[in-house]
Image (cartoon, helix red, strand yellow):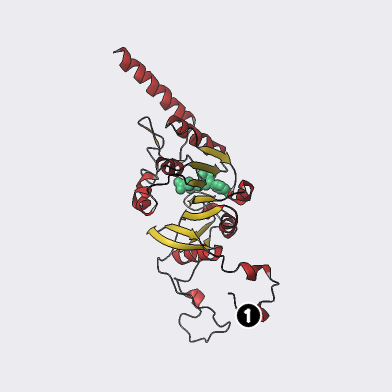
Amino acid sequence: MRMATSATKEDGALRRAIEALGPWFQNLRIGGIETAPDHFLGDYPAFKFARFEPALPQDLTGKTVLDIGCNAGFYSLEMKRRGAAEVLGIDTDDRYLAQARFAADALGFSDMRFEKLSVYDVGALGRRFDLVIFMGVLYHLRHPLLALDLIREHVAGDLMLFQTMQRGPADVLQVPEDAPFHVAATDQPPTYFDNPAYPRMHFIERRYAGDWTNWWAPNAACSQAMLRAAGFSIEAQPEEEVYLCRVAPVPYADWMGEPAVYPARGSKP
Ligand SMILES: C[S@@+](CC[C@H](N)C(=O)[O-])C[C@H]1O[C@@H](n2cnc3c(N)ncnc32)[C@H](O)[C@@H]1O
């Protein structure tokens, strides 16, 4: 009887601590308590993770992981559970970082680190990681391609797990190497830009889904083209909006460093 009472007290204290750190965006399970049981997407992100987790290495023993936009640390924790030697989560929001630190501690992973750092400042880390996680952040950024360029330049060492909200068709147009500036009035579609499967980034000037921090909504062709343009090859697309990428040569690196005399320089490599 006494044990039951003290267990109930502990439960109550844990619940109060979790509530004090709320509201939570990620639904974690800590000591049998859910942090965001009423999430508008359901059991988020566990239900999403279940769909693509087989695409990730099951054993991360000895590997280093950087989780950019880590929020309460769901993906960081999952990578730690797979044996990662080092997991660093970064985010710009102190409330989420406090949640992540609390969760890691409560779940017995006190060697995980969570630091306040923007994706735009990843160069300050001064090193690369075997696995970079960049999930659910791109469309919240005002400068998404810059973020991918910086990740590629400074921290991506091998794999990157990437997710973005996508809107528009899932079809992907095989874009030609080049296209004429002038098109005939009779051409259909009038230009290749009018093809719905052309890489397209929808700009969100106001709010989307009640959230003013949504700035962009690429279609699938655009997500894929941006990843390639930043120097990532797409190894797998285990879910519509999720890509497992690998570091690859940056296709236009030389071209970008040269003077912008476009027509005279010939084509991009
Ligand atoms: C939609 S949540 C995604 C959280 C988590 N990665 C996931 O997939 O569940 C976006 C996260 O990105 C963080 N964020 C926004 N801008 C950021 C930036 N410039 N650098 C790093 N994190 C950022 C937010 O604070 C938030 O935790």
Q: Residues within 10 Å of mark 1 (few under 14, many from 20)?
A: few
Q: Measuring 40% from the left and 60% from the top, which residue is drawn there?
A: 236
Q: Measuring 61% from the left and 51% from the top, which residue is drawn there?
A: 120
Quadrant location of residue 242? bottom left
Q: Quadrant of the C terminus?
A: bottom right
- Find residue 100 and report its horizontal and vertical position in percent: 49, 37
Q: Nearer the viewer, residue 20 or 105?
A: 105
Residue 108, above or below 120: above
- Find residue 106 and report its horizontal and vertical position in percent: 44, 30
- Find residue 37 and report its horizontal and vertical position in percent: 37, 37
Residue furthest toward the top?
Answer: 2
- Find residue 103 and report its horizontal and vertical position in percent: 45, 34
Residue furthest toward the left?
Answer: 1
Q: Measuring 64% from the left and 47% from the top, which residue is drawn there?
A: 124
Q: Nearer the viewer, residue 83 or 164?
A: 83
Residue to which mark 1 is pinned: 266
Q: Measuring 50% from the left and 41% from the top, which residue is drawn there?
A: 86
Label 1 sits on what residue type?
Gly
Q: Quadrant of the N terminus?
A: top left
SS assignment at label 1: loop
